[in-house]
Image (tube, coloured by chain):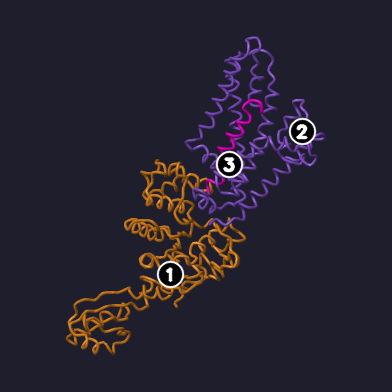
Chain colours: A purple, B orange
Amino acid sequence: MLRFSKLVINEWLKLYKKRSFIIAYAIMALLAIGTSILVWKFSDAGEFPTVSKFVEDLISQMGIGILYTIVAMIFTAGIVSKEFQLGSVKLLLIRSHTRTKILASKYVAMLIYLVALMIFTIAIGSIMGAIMFGVKGEMAWGEVFKTAAFQLLYTAIYSTLMFMFSVLTRSTGATIGIGMGLIMVEGIISMLLSRYEFAKYILFLNMNLSMYSSGGTPPIEGMTFGFSSLIIAVYMAVFIAVSFLVFKKRDVA
Amino acid sequence: MKQGNTAGNSNVVLQLNNVTKKIGKQTIVNQLSFNMHKGEIVGLLGPNGAGKTTTIRMIVGLIEMTSGDVIIQGSSVRSHFTKAIRHVGAIVENPEFYSYMTGLDNLKQYQRMTDGVTDERLRKVVELVGLQDAMKKRVKAYSLGMRQRLGIAQALLHEPSILILDEPTNGLDPAGIREMRDYLKRIAREEGISVLVSSHLLSEMELTCDRVVVIQQGKLVTERLLGEKAEQGESISVIMRVDDTGAAAVALRDLKGVSIVKVNEADRELLLSVQDRDIPGIVSKLSLAGVGIYRITETKQTLEDEFLKWTGGGQIA
């Protein structure tokens, strides 16, 4: 376990030591600050949200949640493909570790990145909320946590898919392109196909679990929280299995 | 063909057994077998496209073998990869690092990947390759020669017993090549480790290696001892310039262990195939016969000729 955690530290450092590392955080900070200013400007003093309500809306799909997903995807897309592009994969794979372990350390580092960026966004959102609207009223941090968890899951699904593409294409550009393309067509596909019964098995229609909590109706009748969770689990398992099998078998030429 | 198998089997650190790689219908490496002994510098020699890089990548597990196996210190690369690879330090083609990180950050990555690599060891390796002053610089700013040295440092970090280098002098200038050669020899001597190095340049191999394994089209062509080891018992070629080639030829005709390969009347030169220990005898014999000697030079031309012959005179460089 100690050795595995060292591999994860290595992967984290590879992300962290890049000069661009701070950019993702700067973007999220600017988005949170900008949103707080907009809300402050366009609502009357009496209607100010509580800090927790502001943060909850901020990180939801309605707020900057989707931008969080995009930023996280862009900055982790190269976690596998960059090694191939730099050629450093050769020096990485000739150590006394199995390829499975090395890829797993990358996956774990990617998930840590997602969580860290979310925590940072919530922290900045809370600070801005407190500054702009004052600390008053009842705080519902449980709701914030729930919204964050749903958004994290939504992002983790996309990131896992990107992780697979990163392994398959060995190209960071292609991976980001595919990821962005999918995010853009996600809504249209969901809309067009939601009248067909089979569409409930499509990942896109199940990804956002928050649709069950906010009292909204699922796109297709009969879909439940449990059903969507199962669909997500199956897709994730497939993405992960493909990633690991291909990475393990691939000749590094 | 001369087998370098002078040492006993207990000394074998690396063993290739019928290693084969097929991609589609093409056979890149065909039933390749050879051994490496402790402390030996072995050159894997062949023209471009002979399968050197593929062979090396199979040894270190970057490419899967179609059949055959590689045994490193008793462990199979195929079935016990992590155990076998522990003994290996390698640079496959140019060493590629995380160029946005410093040299030290890069080495620390590899330090974390192996248990028991102390900071002291890291410092020692950096000193060995002479990069102390460059450790805090980003690798981006390194010259190719410095990258090669950092490559050697990462390969030596975990105290391997075998060092494997794929075309280590590719892209280096003559000074860099010489530096690399000195490092290899020093490492083999000081750290007592075996070195396998691939190249398409025979001249370079002659200066570095104890033995060469020549391959072409994925197949073993020949194995040869080189340098000092070859001179103990194997013939060398010597050109002698004398004042009278005819008299010299007559005087040397019956000398034991000496054969006259060619007589060049115009340049007054004799090409002899002899052993080191015969040279004093030749000199005194010629003096006795009253033949004046102007020059005695060893020539390695024949080895290169042989290399061309082995590899069918294909494109070498």
Quadrant placement of the N terminus of chain B: bottom left
> Mark 1 and mark 2: span between their CA atoms?
70 Å
Residue located at (56% from left, 25% from top): A31
Nearer the camera: disc 3 or disc 1: 3
The residue nearer to you, when weighing B223 against A149, is A149
Quick one: SS at disc 2?
Answer: loop
Residue A76 x %, y %? 57, 39
Q: Provide the residue designation for mark 3.
A: A177
Task: Tell me: A223 left or right of B124.
Answer: right
Disc number placed over residue A219 in the picture, else none? 2
The residue nearer to you, when weighing B40 against B33, is B33
Write down the region rendered in magenta. A60-83
Q: Provide the residue designation for mark 1.
A: B212
Q: Chain of mark 1?
A: B
Query: Label 3 sits on what residue type?
Result: Gly
Taking the view exactly as shown, the residue that stands out farthest to the top is A46
Question: If you read the primary sequence from the N terminus, does the residue marked by circle 3 or circle 2 appear first?
Answer: 3
